[in-house]
Image (cartoon, rainbow, N blue to C red):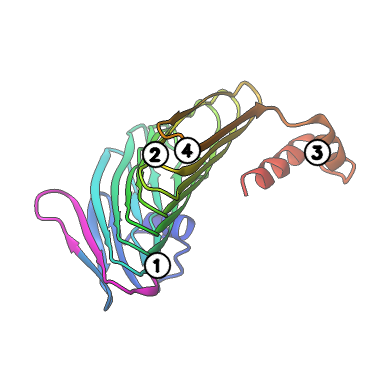
Amino acid sequence: MNSTTEEILKIVSDWKGSFCGAYSIREDGKSIARMSSEHVHIEPKKDKPGLDITIDDGTKGESLAIPACVTHGSVDDLVYNDFFIGSDCDVTIIAGCGVHTDNGESARHNGIHRFFIKDRSRVKYLEKHVGLGKGIGRKSIDPVTEVTLGEDSSLDMETSQIGGVTDSRRVTRGVVGKGSSLIIHERLLTEKNQCATTEFSVDMNGDGSSVDLVSRSVAKDESHQSYHSVIKGNARCTGHSECDAIITGHGTVSATPQLDANCIDASLIHEAAIGKIAGEQLLKLRTFGLTEEEAENEIIKGFLR
């Protein structure tokens, strides 16, 4: 692998020269390293770019890393990864992505991930996105995540876009079964003229199902963000959607949470708050000797933590 790939891996997947457990590393549209474990099986798709990943019933305490790296411009990477999680599992999946360009050519990664999670399984899913390089070419990341949860199972998804991405469209769809839960916490930072769109859509089809969607974002400079979530309560269930955003400079944010209660026992709530950093917060930090810019950065860092 090249040095840019190594830099991306360290940022998005905490790579320290190796991975613990099964892994697949993608570089510029190709798999450059892949290893299965006893209970996590990684196979390349036969009909399109991507992987079929099967995790055996009863697998616990194992991790899987599938980072994707675009290291230069003129790459438009598209990959399809399907995850088949057995019953009674407890696993962690790391799926970071970084795009890099040092010239005027565009670099893009589009990962389409589908999760099929059987009954009584617990999955932790971590996904970091970053754009790197000094080039003026666009750095685009457009992830699509589709989740199907069986009974009494859960997916806890933490996603973050931590800077440098010119534009992104982040789409997440979920179908939640009886007694299952989907938790999605998003952290998003845009600056300069960057644009980011987030689209959540979740169907709660089983009694006792739940969903918790939380987006925290900061729009700086001239950047723009758009957030749209749809929660459909089709059974006795609980649903929560929250969008909290900070704007600085001339940043703009549009938030549209939508709730559809299609069952009398569906309990749904949404919250949205958009505003600037409070003056008293800045003043307090400046009394400790920080400049206004340093104080603002510390507040943003804490907000996105």
The image shows residue 150 at horizontal and vertical percentages of 32, 55
What residue does disc 3 label? 291
The image shows residue 199 at horizontal and vertical percentages of 41, 33
Please report whichever mark, 1 or 4, sits nearer to the chain's N-terminal start. Answer: 1
- What label sits on residue 249 in the rendered view? none
What residue does disc 1 label? 91
- Residue 53 part of the magenta-drawn span: yes
- Residue 260 part of the magenta-drawn span: no
Q: CA distance from mark 1 to mark 4?
A: 30 Å
Please report whichever mark, 4 or 3, sits nearer to the chain's N-terminal start. Answer: 4
Please report whichever mark, 2 or 4, sits nearer to the chain's N-terminal start. Answer: 2
Helix, strand or loop under label 3: loop
Q: Residues within 10 Å of mark 4 (few under 14, many from 20)?
A: many
Which span is picked out in magenta?
A: 43-62
Identified by mark 3, the residue type is: Thr
Q: What residue appears at the point 46 percent right and 34 percent down from the top-left corner? A: 264
The image shows residue 160 at horizontal and vertical percentages of 50, 46
> From the image, which quarter does the N terminus lie in?
bottom left
Helix, strand or loop under label 2: strand
Q: Nearer the viewer, mark 1 or mark 2?
A: 2
What residue does disc 4 label? 266
Identified by mark 4, the residue type is: Ala
Q: Nearer the viewer, mark 2 or mark 4?
A: 4
Q: Nearer the viewer, mark 1 or mark 4?
A: 4
Q: Nearer the viewer, residue 92 or 16?
A: 92
Above or below — where is 39 with respect to 32? below
Identified by mark 1, the residue type is: Val
Q: Nearer the viewer, residue 249 or 302?
A: 302
Q: CA distance from mark 3 to mark 2?
A: 43 Å
